Image (tube, rainbow, N blue to C red):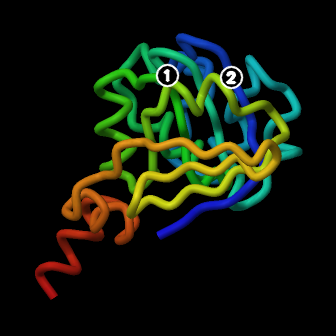
Amino acid sequence: MQAKGMVFKYPDNVDTDVIIPARYLNSQDANELAQHCMEDIDKGFVKKVRPGDVMVGGWNFGCGSSREHAPLVIKTSGISCVIAKSFARIFYRNSINIGLPILECPEAAEAIAAGDTVAVDFDSGVITDETSGKTFAAEPFPPFIQNIIRAGGLMNAIREKQA
């Protein structure tokens, strides 16, 4: 499984209220919510993001409340992978549950610049900044988590296993 796209880069401690402001959580429609993804930190994000693009963050990405909406709107907006120096624990698990691939790699998160093109091989954990030519090694997910992500989330993986 692979991803490749242009990078949107964000600082340390991007919390879930920045990813999807609470004022919009009166809707459960993921497409509607995704129209507000990152708007408090990057007003042009939803107009610029394309399917397959990659988000890069600093330390403690996804801190704040435990709402599953945050990784959901990132995925729904078209982001194929989030790379960060570290993730808040609940955001990390929620991302896996909804099938959003995420990788912790401090070296990659530091070196990759906004606008770069990045390719990610989820099976090996190799991150390639095609703009700079640098490669980085993240810890790949174990096979059972890769299966959850391939299925598009935990509930889909359970349904597939039962079929």
- Where residue 22 sits, quadrant-wise, is top right
Would you place residue 107 above or below residue 33 in this image?
above
Circles 2 and 1: CB distance less than 8 Å?
A: yes
Q: x, y (%) of residue 41?
A: 75, 18
4 or 33, which lies in front? 4
Disc sitting over residue 10 in the figure: 2
Q: Amino acid at mark 1?
A: Phe
At 11% from the left and 81% from the top, the residue drawn is: 162
Structural crowding at the residue carrying mark 2, measured as other residues with C-alpha within 10 Å and reported as few (<14), some (14–19) or many (≥20): many
Q: x, y (%) of residue 130?
A: 76, 52
At 42% from the left and 14% from the top, the residue drawn is: 64
Q: Amino acid at mark 2?
A: Tyr
Distance from disc 2 to disc 1, alpha carbons, whole Å, reads 9 Å
Residue at disc 2, secondary structure: loop
- Quarter of the image with the C terminus in it: bottom left
The reply, left or right, for residue 13 in relation to residue 51 is left
119 or 29, which lies in front? 119
Would you place residue 30 above or below residue 91 in this image?
below
Indicate which disc, 2 or 1, sits on the residue closer to the N terminus.
2
Q: Residue furthest bottom?
A: 163
Q: x, y (%) of residue 43?
A: 85, 26
Q: x, y (%) of residue 17?
A: 55, 18
Q: Pointer 1: what residue?
A: 61
Residue at disc 1, secondary structure: loop
- Where residue 55 sits, quadrant-wise, is top right
